[in-house]
Amino acid sequence: MPTVALNNGITMPQIGFGVFRIPDDDTERTVLQAIECGYRSIDTASLYGNERGVGRAVAGCGLPREDLFVTTKLWNDDQGRRRAKDAFHASLKRLGLDYVDLYLIHWPKPSRNLYVETWELLEELYGAGLTRAIGVSNFQPNHLDALIAQGEVVPAINQIELHPLLQQRSVRRYDANHGIVTVAWSPLGQANSIEDPVIGAIAKRHDRTPAQIILRWHLQLGTVVIPKSVRPSRMRQNLDILTFSLDAEDLAAIDRLDTGVRFGPDPDEQDTGRKTGFSSSDGRWTAGAD
Ligand code: NDP
């Protein structure tokens, strides 16, 4: 498993396993299958409602805790020093852990203007050894500028929507220039990327699946990926991307697929509460009532 070094010296597997939209009751079994397939990094969030299932899998998988890399995230409603502290400890309790490897602010939610204060709390959790690294998700360069100017710790990670149809060049450049590792969420870009004919042609040439081509592209960019699948055959397929590589022509063809169009919300506008999420019917984001 390739790893990336974070800005505080700890390492993170470059391929992890995402658990968004896996019901808590199915999560323990699914994460155990993923660990069995070889995943060592699990990406959950308070929002996903399945931290308990992740925790049960971590406890029951038979591996030493230090062999696993567990990420969870602070939901928007819990921003602000006091609520964030309680929310972190509630996540830790649901996970059944005494520390996490990575704790992220899920969205900047700029309309609340609490993300700098929230970051200061994350710095305290990090200082207390309750999380081995801290970072953010869905932060744009202007949000990161504020954290870097006012905080003491530079985020280790920025987890953003990133796939061939949304290549996020300026955010990736900003992250790289500041020593922040970019993690790609929805790395497969949902069906639209997987079914793209250009990806299909490259897959055919390499005798690989389209998902493998997309994940290999991410690896060659240097980003961390956290694909989700409830099917062990796909879990294995998504890990089996280390024994081939894309050439300059393949990479150039994928570069040209960037549309700049998001499937998820715009971080500058995302301003909804806990009910926000992908709708199960079409896989697109829907705004919650609150
Ligand atoms: P992905 O890009 O991982 O795609 C998941 C979808 O692709 C599922 O429908 C899955 O179906 C299917 N799939 C997986 N592997 C294959 C394959 N080899 N061939 C064909 N289809 C495949 O999208 P997600 O939105 O789940 O993102 C991944 C993770 O990113 C999440 O689980 C979560 O951890 C994180 N995330 C973070 C966000 C944030 O705001 N920070 C927002 C959204 C996600 P099936 O399960 O049936 O195999």
Image (cartoon, helix red, strand yellow):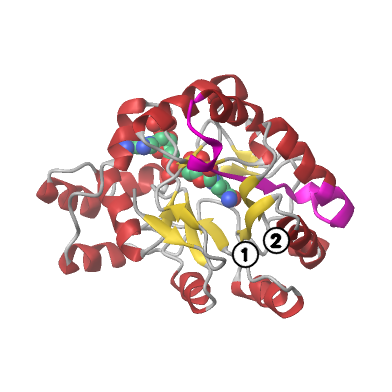
Q: CA distance from mark 1 to mark 2?
A: 6 Å
- Residue 250, image x, y percentages: 19, 62
The structure residue drawn at horizontal position 67% and vertical position 36%, both measured from the top left corner, is 97
For the record, the magenta segment spans 61-85
Badge 1 or badge 2: first in the primary sequence: 2
Q: Secondary structure at mark 1?
A: loop
> For ligand 1, which image quadrant applies?
top left
Q: Image check: 151 left or right of 170?
A: right
Quadrant assignment, res 107? bottom right
Give the total of numbered labels.
2
Mark 2, residues whose alpha carbon is within 10 Å: few (<14), some, or many (≥20)?
many
User: Label 1 amino acid?
Assistant: Phe
Question: Is residue 63 a member of the stretch shown in magenta?
Answer: yes
Q: Is mark 2 within 8 Å of ligand 1?
A: no
Question: Is residue 1 a member of the stretch shown in magenta?
Answer: no
The structure residue drawn at horizontal position 30% and vertical position 62%, both measured from the top left corner, is 220
- Residue 161, image x, y percentages: 50, 55
Q: Image check: 168 left or right of 90?
A: left
User: Label 2 amino acid?
Assistant: Pro
* Closer to the camera in the image, 81 or 124: 124
Residue that mark 2 sits on: 108
Q: Mark 1 touching mark 2, by CB under 8 A? A: yes
Residue that mark 1 sits on: 139
* Closer to the camera in the image, 77 or 258: 77
* Closer to the camera in the image, 254 or 215: 215
